[in-house]
Amino acid sequence: MISPREEFVRQGNVRDALLEAAATLFSKNGYSAVSMREIAKVANANVGSLTYHFGSKANLLREIYARHTEPMNRRRLELLGEARRIRDPHERLRAILRAYVLPAFAPSGDSGGGAEFTRMRAVLSAEGNEDARAIIAGAFDDISRAFIEAIGECVPGASLEGLVWRSQFLLGSLYYALINPERVTRLSDGAVDGNDREAAINQIVEASLASFHALADAQGRAAAE
């Protein structure tokens, strides 16, 4: 059985083979440690083809992000628009959180990021490379601000500081649930299936829902004192 990468090369689609090889290597080793030569070797291509198709490693990474984030962000905005039409603030907040989480769990070919891309995002975010940081910001900052604004409308009185921090915690839980579902299974001694996608989505949404409501309650108590 041949791999998707081998199929790309066999059909002459060297560009796709290079993108897939780079995403796999970046998700395992980070951005800085992976060379253009290594990417070409894994893709069964030559280094010249990388330069021809992308010009630089940064442009290659930018293309990987565009392929994954553009459909994912479009789907997030579609679901966000639907969620914002819900009248009840509690249910609207739940729907907004689900609009953010759900597309990340979809397979990479189905308007989602997929586990490997999410793993790559987590590794690159921790690495702190300047090229990667700029690409990540360009791909996600605007959509994140849109969700923070929508969440804030559901929890009036909540501080921007609290909204941003708890949105960051939401992202962290999303990362970890996608890249290490086996830990959930292991810690529960098999009672919980960490690979149950719908259960993971529901748990992340409900935990974040409680977190943002607790923020609103705390702000209310502080204002009353």
Image (cartoon, rainbow, N blue to C red):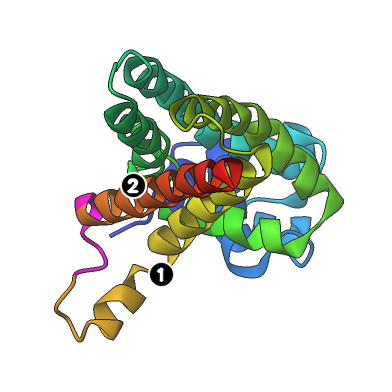
User: Three-letter amino acid code at disc 2?
Assistant: Val
Q: In the displayed image of the protein, which residue is found farthest to the left? A: 191
Reading the image, the residue beneath label 2 is: 205
In magenta segment, residue 111: no
Disc 1 is placed on an element classified as loop
Vertical placement of residue 115 versus 99, above or below? below
Residue 139's spot in the image, x, y percent? 65, 33
Which of 51 and 133 lies nearest the eye of the viewer?
Answer: 133
Say left or right for 82 vs 168. Answer: left
Counting residues from the N terminus, which is met first, the one under dot 2 or under dot 1? 1
Alpha carbon distance from label 2 to label 1: 18 Å
Which of 109 and 9 lies nearest the eye of the viewer?
Answer: 109
Q: Which residues are magenta?
A: 193-198
Residue 75's spot in the image, x, y percent? 40, 24
Residue 190's spot in the image, x, y percent? 17, 81
Reading the image, the residue beneath label 1 is: 180
In magenta segment, residue 197: yes
Count of numbered circles in the view? 2
Q: Residue at x 23, y 82 (%)?
A: 188
Say left or right for 10 vs 29. Answer: left
Q: Main secondary structure of the magenta part?
A: loop
Label 2 crowding class (10 Å Cα cut-off): few <14, some 14-19, many 20+?
many
* Residue 21 appears in the picture as rendered: no
Residue 159's spot in the image, x, y percent? 63, 39
Q: Residue at x 29, y 16 (%)?
A: 87
**Mark 2 or 1, which is nearer the eye?**
2
Disc 2 is placed on an element classified as helix
* Residue 97 appears in the picture as rendered: yes
Vertical placement of residue 87 versus 220, above or below? above
Q: In the displayed image of the protein, which residue is found farthest to the right? A: 130
Which of 57 and 200 lies nearest the eye of the viewer?
Answer: 200
User: Three-letter amino acid code at disc 1?
Assistant: Asn
